[in-house]
Amino acid sequence: MRITRMTAVAGAFALAMAAAACGGDDSGSGAGSGIVGKASSQKKLVVGVKADQPGLGLQTGGTYTGFDIEIAKIIAKGLGVPESGIEYKTTVSSNREPFIQQGQVDMVVATYTINDERKKVVNFGGPYYVAGQDLLVAADSTITGPEALVGKKVCSVSGSTPAKRIQNDYKGVNLQQFDSYSKCVQALSNKTVDAVTTDDIILAGYAAQEQYAGKFKVVGKKFSDEPYGIGVKKTDTEGCNKINEILKTAATDGSYKAAWDSTLGKSGTPAPQLDVTKLTNCS
């Protein structure tokens, strides 16, 4: 009798563990899980965004505005989540992968360059825009491009693709790293650095800010391609594919152009064509 009870207890424990293993995985590897499952069941999503990039992701009080924010709204709507169901969480370049892996955010829309190193740990939908690395300098600067940076102090953000490119490809540059581009721009304003480097469209947003009007210029010599993607968990293939489907629709129904026109388009730059033939192969 005692053996029977022990066997029953052991059997119940095994069944409980099996159920937990089947039901407790929200990694996105199965149908209905990941961002698709959460959007369907909860009508909510947590989106990692930048908070200090004018025209792209800028926080003012409790409000976030910019092109990335509008893209996040398009993706959320396509998943069935209303704007009221989106919670924005400020991310910086160095914590985007950890936030996705730890489940602190469901997806990241934060000037997030798709590259092979990042694809090892997260999955990407997109790209929804292709930027290029450039330099922001004082209006009277003689810096003409990256080849003129030897011996100069250049600021970028820790963990960012632009910072790594300067370190790896441009020797002799004194690289200063902060956790946000706004700090780099302030350093440029204070003349403690000679240039700020990141994607051209981010730099243009800073240069256009009222407090910096006439003080800076974007050199205008791009030295990279930076395809911006939407990051999700590595195992969330379903979510990644759904993001690409939504972007394909946005490219033709006017919502992508509207997102640009209401944000970065205010600078006078016409909306780019979203090339859906270059969307990632989700894996």
Image (cartoon, helix red, strand yellow):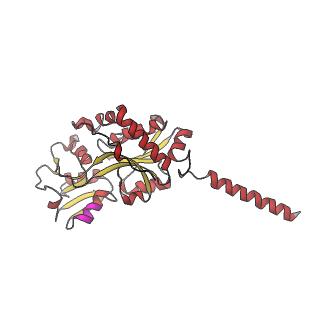
User: Which span of residues is magenta-colored?
Assistant: 164-169
- Quarter of the view holding residue 205: top left
- In the rendered image, residue 135 lying in the magenta stretch gets the answer no
Q: Is residue 63 visible?
A: no
Furthest-right residue in this view: 1
**Vertical arrangement, residue 11 with respect to residue 36, above or below:** below
User: Is residue 262 or residue 277 the one in the foreground?
Assistant: 277
Q: Quadrant of residue 251?
A: top left
**Residue 166 on the magenta segment:** yes
At 81% from the left edge and 63% from the top edge, which residue is drawn? 6
The answer to whether residue 249 is left or right of residue 215 is right
Check the picture and name the quadrant holding the N terminus: bottom right
Residue 119 at x, y = what percent? 41, 57
Measured as percent of width and height from the top left, residue 8 is found at 80, 59
Asked whether residue 77 appears in the rendered view, the answer is: yes
Circle count: 0
At x 76%, y 57%, the residue is: 12
Q: Which residue is outermost to the bottom?
A: 172
Q: Position of residue 224 (x, y in %)?
A: 25, 55
Left/right placement of residue 50 relative to residue 22 reads left
Q: Position of residue 21 (x, y in %)?
A: 63, 55
Question: Which of the two residues, 245 or 170, is positioned nearer the viewer here?
Answer: 245
User: Residue 121 sits in which quadrant?
Assistant: bottom left
Going by the image, does 15 lie left or right of 226? right
> Looking at the image, which residue is at 20% across and 61% down?
153
Left or right: residue 42 versus residue 256 is right
Q: Could you tell me what secondary structure mostly forms the magenta stretch? A: helix
